[in-house]
Amino acid sequence: MPSNKKPNKLESVSRALRTLSAGNRTLLRASDEQELVRDMCRVIVEQGGYRLACVGYARNDENKTIQWMECDGMAKEHLQALYPSWAGTDVGQTPFSTAISTGKPSVARHVFTDPVYATPAHAQLMELAIERGYASATAFPLQVEGEILGALLMAAAEPEGFDEEELELLNELADDLAYGIATLRMRIEHRKAQEAIAHLAYHDPLTGLPNRIHLHERLGEAIEFAKRQHHPLALLYLEIGQFHEINEILGHRAGDQLVQQLAGRLTRAAKLDELLARVGEAGFALLVPDVGADDAAKEALRFLDVLHDPMEISGLTVDAPLSAGIALFPGHGSDAEALLRRANAAVRRATPARGGYAFYSGQEQENALRLRLMGELRQAIERDELRLYCQPKVTIASRQPCGAEALVRWEHPLHGSIGTGEFIKLAEQAALITPLTNWVLNAAFSQGYVWYEAGLRRPLSVNLSVHDLREPKLIERIRGLFSTWGLPPELIQFEITESALMEDPASARDALVRLKDLGVELYIDDFGTGYSSLSYLQKLPVDWIKIDQSFVMPMATSRDSALIVRSTIELGHNLGLRVVAEGVDSQVLWDQLGTWGCDVAQGFFVSEPMPADRFNEWETHWSPASS
């Protein structure tokens, strides 16, 4: 029954403070909105001593619906049936409705004498008030940054309850509750935003499939699990054929539709324990756990069959063939990156004749290494990580050093010394011949200047390729280097292979003429291997020929080689040219060449190629009298 006793002011303030304190503790513990509202209503009744505490949210819909969230002291379903709306003439003046409408606290100090409740519409409420024992009620708006979320409804047993001081304290409680609700909602929105960002980070936006990052993580986990269980697994790389042609002909929108349709078919075909991901513009990857080569091949064929039928794209029937590359753990790799890279490499070998799929093989690994080395060679050139080597040339008659050939070496941090022939091929394949030649030219001129400043007139010869001869800026670059370093032209020489000259004789001759105009000496390198004619040789502005080592090295045991070398020396001298023999690796060859009047020797008998900064030390120990 309601109390007829008016509330003691001290008691009312005390219970409000008690309620406020309990409410603050509730705010700190709450982890979700429904829990906060429920616990707040409970502590208002149980610890504050109030008879009723309810929270309702005001909806701004057509009917201005009240959604009663929690209620302690009355079943919220009962309250929902009594007051479903905060609009209308019958309930428009209740504390809850007034708090929502005005945004201010509203009080009914005596529900039994208040004329608002003396209507048939409130008859059930009066019965409940008598039954539950409350005589006064108040409602506080729950608002955050000007937006009213709803209201907190409270009731007390005493008539004339809720004086100003009590209202002020309870209004603070309502503000705290509103802030708590808003904070929890903000956390939810923040969590949703984080989940959306995470989803974008780990999923392909076009298909919704896991992306490369997601696959990489899951594949890594699968590999670790397979290691512990001593099980194999397979990674299939599925690539759409002719995708770029479809994009060009039908447009990117049609290409996107194709990818989406393919993704749908692949998703429906994937088993529960398989992971399908989109890992490239036209590529998908499928992680298949606990299978070896035979089962992986069967799975590849199953997916190829799924995509066998053509698709309707932009009103056209499109046939998009699919190829599959397969890499296996542990046979083809033991980490996620290696498996993905090798499955991708294997797909290049997949052809209809092979069933549309192919397993990874070592050839792909060699190709991958070559591609990686191409990129690293570019970096080595750009970062000045190559090293200039020199191989001495010695005048046979006087045994005096007369210069050196400039060579380049690449010491790879992982693979050690990369053979000159190998990385020259890499430079050709990666279109790096011009940057590499520029590096050698810069290094040769710089080293030539060091020797020149030290009083050493030591010519240094630089090799030029057929590609270099076709480079329109070559001559100007060399002229600029002479200007930069101030070297006499006789200290820098150039060697061009006979085969390079014969590739485009007219253009090569023009380039040599322009080089000769700089005042430098020119060599025909590897002479005897390029099948040049005598008439062509006479037209070239060269000073030297270098007999290829393939003729020089065997001449002590081969009469044919000896005849070729001797004839070449005589031919060179008859044309007014000096002659260098390459590949001189023994005293026997040295002596024989001297007998025939060869001018200069170069080879391991004289010295192996050495770092340029060790040349002076070598010359100090080189004896003109004996080797």
Image (cartoon, helix red, strand yellow):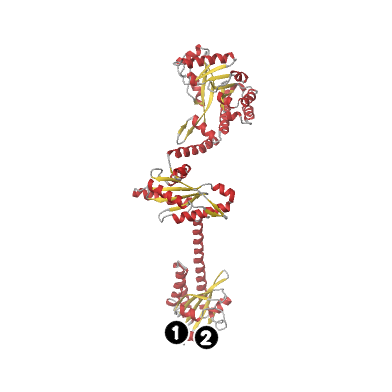
| Tag 2 residue | 121
| Tag 1 residue | 133
Nearest to viewer (mark 1 / mark 2):
2
Query: Helix, strand, or loop for circle 1?
Result: loop
Q: Is residue 486 visible?
A: no
Q: Residue at x 41, y 47 (%)?
A: 297
Amino acid type for the residue under numbered disc 2: Ala
Q: Around disc 1, counting alpha carbons within 10 Å, would you say few (fewer than 14), some (14 to 19), or many (20 or more)?
A: some
Q: Pinpoint residue 81: horizontal percent, then vertical percent.
A: 49, 80
Q: Is residue 90 visible?
A: yes
Amino acid type for the residue under numbered disc 1: Gly
Quarter containing the N terminus: bottom left
Q: Pinpoint residue 383: horizontal percent, then vertical percent.
A: 54, 36
Q: In which quarter of the image is residue 103?
A: bottom right
Q: Pinpoint residue 616: horizontal percent, then vertical percent.
A: 51, 22
Q: Quadrant of residue 402?
A: top right
When the figure is inspected, residue 203 is found, relative to residue 183, above or below; the finding is above
Q: How far apart are marks 1 and 2 (CA)?
A: 20 Å
Q: Pinpoint residue 586: horizontal percent, then vertical percent.
A: 45, 17
Q: Which of 530 and 118 is in front in this view?
A: 530
Asked if the residues shown at circle 1 and circle 2 are in contact, with their CB atoms under 8 angstroms apart, the answer is no
Q: In this view, does 218 lie to the left or right of 119?
A: left
Identify the mark nearer the N-term, 1 or 2. Answer: 2
When the figure is inspected, residue 103 is found, relative to residue 352, above or below; the finding is below
Among all residues in the image, which is located at the extreme left?
Answer: 229
